[in-house]
Image (cartoon, rainbow, N blue to C red):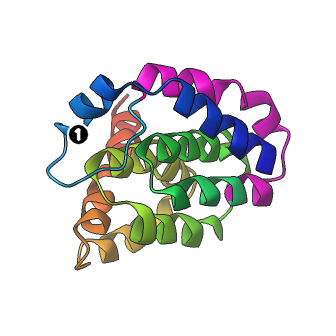
Amino acid sequence: MRQIIANIRKSLKQNSDSRAKSAGQKFFKEDVKLYGVKAAQVTKIAREYDKRILATPKKEVFGLCEELWLSGYLEESFIACRFAYLIRQTYEPSDFKVFERWVAEYVSNWAACDTLCNHTIGAFVEKYPNFIEDLKKWTKSENRWVKRAAAVTLIIPARNENS
């Protein structure tokens, strides 16, 4: 797993662009740690690992995601979200605590919040709708990103319900 992290970071650095970094910062009110890699390129970098992630036990994938979140880089958070979403077929109720902690500890801007919640946590709630009760508790949080996460998590499940 260490090699995957090293390779991802090397690719992100190689694809960074100071203009993209500057332009990216304009989308946020708060300071955001960026490499300056466009979203399409971040997705391309992450896709290189899809097969390997799908063949890796969930615990190891979550550990990899944790490492990516810990960096504080927005692009690494997007990759962490992608990897966690890729293994959505393996989600089980105990995973909610992992996702809840990621929101509380690592999400610090709207882009990371929306990416994690729309896909990863949204897929979890579609599989385990009884956790909507836990999302309701998030609405009372002092942390604005946890509060936002409660609403954003329900966007895709609500769309799918209406399809």
Residue 141, relative to residue 33: is it above or below? below
Q: Quadrant of the C terminus?
A: top left
Residue 83 is situated, as x and y percent measured from the top left of the image, at: 63, 42
Residue 126 is situated, as x and y percent measured from the top left of the image, at: 50, 49
Residue under numbered circle 1: 25
Residue 33 seen from this side: yes
Range covered by the magenta-colored residues = 37-62
Mark 1 crowdedness (10 Å alpha carbons): few <14, some 14-19, many ≥20 = some
Q: Magenta stretch: residue 45 in it?
A: yes
State left or right for residue 126 relative to residue 152: right
Q: Residue at x 68, y 57 (%)?
A: 62
Q: Residue at x 73, y 50 (%)?
A: 90
Main structural element of the magenta stretch: helix, strand or loop?
Answer: helix
> What amino acid does circle 1 point to?
Gln
Residue 138 quadrant: bottom left
Q: Magenta stretch: residue 70 in it?
A: no
Q: Residue at x 57, y 20 (%)?
A: 44
State left or right for residue 43 relative to residue 151: right
Residue 153 seen from this side: no
Q: Residue at x 32, y 67 (%)?
A: 146
